[in-house]
Amino acid sequence: MTHLREHIQRLPADLIATYSTSGSSFRLRIHAYGRKLSSQDVRNRIELLKVFPLDSRVDLQNPTHSFHLLEDYGLEDLAEPALKPAQLFFGRWLADSNKDAAHKLRLDERYFIGTTSMDPLLALVMANQALVSPGSLVYDPFVGTGSLIIAAAYFGGYTFGADIDKILLHGRGRSTRAKKTWRKSDESVLANFRQYGLEKQYVDVLVADATSRFLRDDVQFDAIIADPPYGVREPIARVGKEKFNPSCDDTQAVSSGMPAGADFQLGRCVLNDLIITLVSFAAKHLRTGGRLVYWLPVLQDEYNDSAVPRHACFDVISNSEQCLSGSTSRRLITMEKVKDWDPNYQVTFAKEIYTETFRERYFTSTKDKDRPKHLRFKNKISRKVRPTEPKELQPVTGLPARQ
């Protein structure tokens, strides 16, 4: 506290004057984390902070400036709380956090969810980093159950999405909720918007392949937010009968939900092809100044800065990590478009990091041999298994006759 008082006394006079203008008011608030302060403790700290030379009046209810002292005493579950704070923070209030939004949008009460529905707090962080504001046009090319565009709509954006999974978008198939077998007939992305009173922010969702060109060249978005499939819980898929990209293997068929007899099929696609497509699409369809925010899955022992895609149209604004289980993590990448699209610009990054599907690399991480057995991810599922002929069913004997 002594150092804090000395620091406050050394503040420039012109800085103090900005908070002491005629008609302005202020208040001091004391907050402690990891320890409960008595009313006398609070008064003592306010007395110590009287060295803050403000000439404006005090207003505890609606001040022009609100100054806060934060004391961090460490973890609250310690047997004996610390007597002195480990850290002190003193500053001016700018805005309140919006914790109620994450609680309001929580997944356990959402009408339509799936196995990969994004945590509402992370979805709100992504929409916030994308600078979504009222009137923004926001697009999610891997929309799924709509978690990301719901967060964008909460900030006032008009939302549009696409996904290759027809069954999911139409709310059909098996439910992911406990003790529920099939989805209800009215489950859909739009149903979630209606649940939160955000229907006016809903533009539409399309059944479409993110790696194909299905939008007009002049379509422009203010923000693109995405959580591409990693191939662990959901397959990385694309439409196409021919191998127009050698990195894709159409022989590995996945559940498509497409009508029988269609003239196309779905095939698996490696992660780098998906990343290149996403960044290239954003370079073309984002307005200048718009932002692309997406998750990039990585293996910690292989990750370096060269794994983050680069493009001449974009500046990387932020790159933060969320650790997952074992040796994997994912990076939240925020890129801002700084120049107009040019067809000659190409995406560059360390492609060798994603030469196989992330699923295979996830289950065969080189760190497995150095970790305890119960934490190892190595699994027979990562091996290529040759298809076998279906076995002939044998009659079961000894069962009672059906009445």
Image (tube, grey):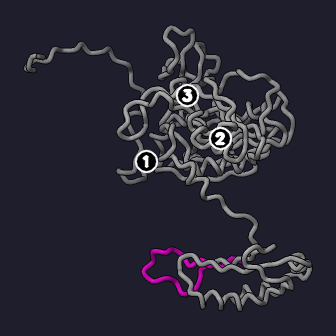
Instruction: Please say if 123 is above or below 43.
Output: above
Please name whichever residue, 217 or 137, is drawn nearer the observer in this view of the structure. Answer: 137
Res 252 label: none
Residue that badge 2 annotates: 198
Residue 381 to residue 29: above or below: above
CB under 8 Å between discs 3 and 2: no
Q: Is residue 170 left or right of residue 312?
A: left
- Label 1 or label 2, whichever comes before in sequence order: 2
| Mark before the other along the chain sequence, 3 or 1 | 3
Q: Amino acid at mark 2?
A: Leu
Residue sitting at x 49%, y 46%: 109
Residue type at numbered disc 3: Leu
Q: Position of residue 226 (x, y in %)?
A: 64, 39
Judging by the rendered image, the residue that carries numbered circle 3 is 169
Q: Which mark is in front, 3 or 1?
A: 3
Q: Nearer the viewer, residue 150 or 6?
A: 150
Q: CA distance from mark 3 to mark 2?
A: 18 Å
- Quarter of the picture containing the C terminus is top left
Image-based side of 76 in relation to 279, left or right? left
Q: Which residue is mark 1?
A: 368
Q: Residues within 10 Å of mark 3 (few under 14, many from 20)?
A: many
Q: Which one is closest to the eye, mark 3 or mark 2?
A: 2
> Looking at numbered disc 1 in the image, what kind of residue is underneath it?
Asp
Going from N to C along the chain, the mark reached first, 3 or 2, is: 3
The region drawn magenta spans: 71-91
